[in-house]
Image (cartoon, rainbow, N blue to C red):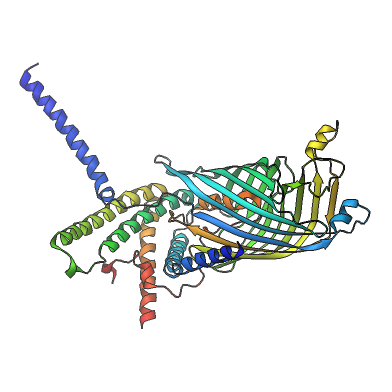
Amino acid sequence: MNPGNYIFKVLMFICTIFLFNTEINGQATTYDSLKVKLPKHYFKTVIVVDAYNKADQKFADTNDFIAKRLKSYGLKQFSLSFYTPLVSYTDVDTVKNITKNTHILLTGNYVRLRPVFEGIKQHDLVKIGFGLRFIFNSGKKGVWFVDTSPFITRDVTYVSKGYFRMASTVVYSHNVSERFNWRIGATKSFMWGNKNYWPFIGLRFGRLDKTHLSIQFPRSINLNVPVGPKLTMSFYTKPQGGMYNFSNHDSLYYLSNAATFSYTRYELNSGFRADVRASDKFNFYVAAGISSRNNITFYSEKANKARPNLPYRTYFFKETLEPTIFINLGLVFKFGKTRTFYEDRNMYDVMDLNNTMDVGDNGGSAGNPQIPITPKSKKEINLQSVQDLIDYNDF
Amino acid sequence: MKSLFKIFILCCLFLCSGYSVAQGDKDKVEAIRVSFISEQLKLTTNESEKFWPVYNEYNDKIKAVRKNLRQSFKKAPDELTDKDAEDLYLLDLKSKQAEAELYKQYREKIKAIIGARKTVKLRAAEEEFKRKVMDAIKDKND
């Protein structure tokens, strides 16, 4: 090959690469060169402070030795829970025009439960847990949700050993349309005082940002009515409960020398809840109603294991009390700038899944604080708030 | 312990309250705007699940560019040094160019999802909403 020709070809090749690179850089430069920061996550960091009280009730069973000793039963619960996004990854399929996203959240909860027994000294039962949530939005109809929440429960009134337990949930959610959704999965939450996996079956009728009925077995049945962008009313039935470690300091389990035993409780709460969106960073809610099927059990897994052919959950005390009233108050703090997802039905479902499975299953749900509700009134528009929409040439 | 908790709550409420008005208005207008566009476009379920993530991403980027520019223009022009003025002038040009590029890039994506007719409808709906907002502002000032 002629050396001059060869050099010419090499130079042409280098120039082509240079021009191509310039073109690529040229396409990317203007927006990227501004180094404008976009929020990384869709989820805000949310902290929920929740207080739950149930009225005291006398034990009606006068034949049971333990019931006679305990005299009455009431409940006071304080819980603090949070979730915060760790990873948010968005993937766009440019051929099919599908936007998929993956979210990993860190969750944590602290519960201080005070079962009020008139006949014995006060016990404070504590539960502390941290977990991870993985949510995958396929960008089409389906959303996957996986939650693992290991926790420790301990009776802090007396020196006692903590019990380690693991709550977990796997759910597939399918958005047939914006007005109908079904969910299927499995959940182990201890909220029914149990420690087995239960099937999870969910149905929703209606849009999440409008009036809708949501049946999420075994967690809740909700009728949500947004009254305006600041207020949502809901009527619901849901279990409230848990499984705790209780010190045998009072010798309630007099047949055993076990230092601790398991205390489980659940009640079925039916009532109304008002969620107030006070600001972009703060919500609060008030709920009240009737607490029925007030179930309480004591058993010692260790003592039961020592006796052959006995199920682990053979109770030495079990009572179901008459319905009573409950009250539940909560404060919800939201932090951080997030990406917008207006009218994005799958993202609404992602948010709803995360709030249906409230962190720690202690009854303190944040109440879908991030799903935007369109105001009915178009008055009171602040000029400052719309400057991003209007250019000076528009006037 | 209880008093500490109460103080903590009061501090949080105090910190949160000042932020609420401007941001709340902004979210309210944005929700009305999106709802208006949604009504006008009448997207199918299939179009809707593809369109909104793209359109929201576009809006996030445009808003970020405009906010960046607005924040840079906070200082009074007479107080700027010559170099600062030059930098600001270049930032203004770049921002407008970035907006135009984003507009082209995302309209093409949107057209691939909802077709040319609905993309034109989208533009018309955006303009219509802008006009409604300006009318509302005029009415308020009259």
Q: Residue furthest right?
A: A63
Q: Which residue lies furthest to the bottom in this view?
A: B142
Measuring 26% from the left and 61% from the top, which residue is drawn there? B72
Does residue A277 appear to the left or right of B32 in the view shown?
right
Q: Which residue lies furthest to the top in this view?
A: A1
Q: Can residue A86 be seen in this view?
A: yes
> Could you tell me residue A26's position as x and y percent?
22, 44
> Could you tell me residue A164's position as x and y percent?
66, 40
- Nearer to the camera, A266 or A176: A266
- Nearer to the camera, A172 or B16: B16
- Nearer to the camera, A209 or B74: B74
Q: Is residue B45 visible?
A: no
Q: In which quarter of the image is the C terminus of chain B?
A: bottom left
Measuring 78% from the left and 36% from the top, which residue is drawn there? A302
Q: In this view, does B16 lie above or below A220?
A: below
Q: In which quarter of the image is the N terminus of chain B?
A: bottom right
Q: In this view, does A367 lie above or below A174?
A: below
Picture quadrant where residue A292 is located: bottom right
Picture quadrant where residue A199 is located: top right
Q: Is residue A115 above or below residue B75?
A: above
> Could you tell me residue A197's position as x and y percent?
70, 40
Does residue A39 appear to the left or right of A287 in the view shown?
left
Does residue A145 appear to the left or right of A120 in the view shown?
left
Measuring 52% from the left and 70% from the top, which residue is drawn there? A376
- Nearer to the camera, B49 or B29: B29
Q: How many labels does the image show?
A: 0
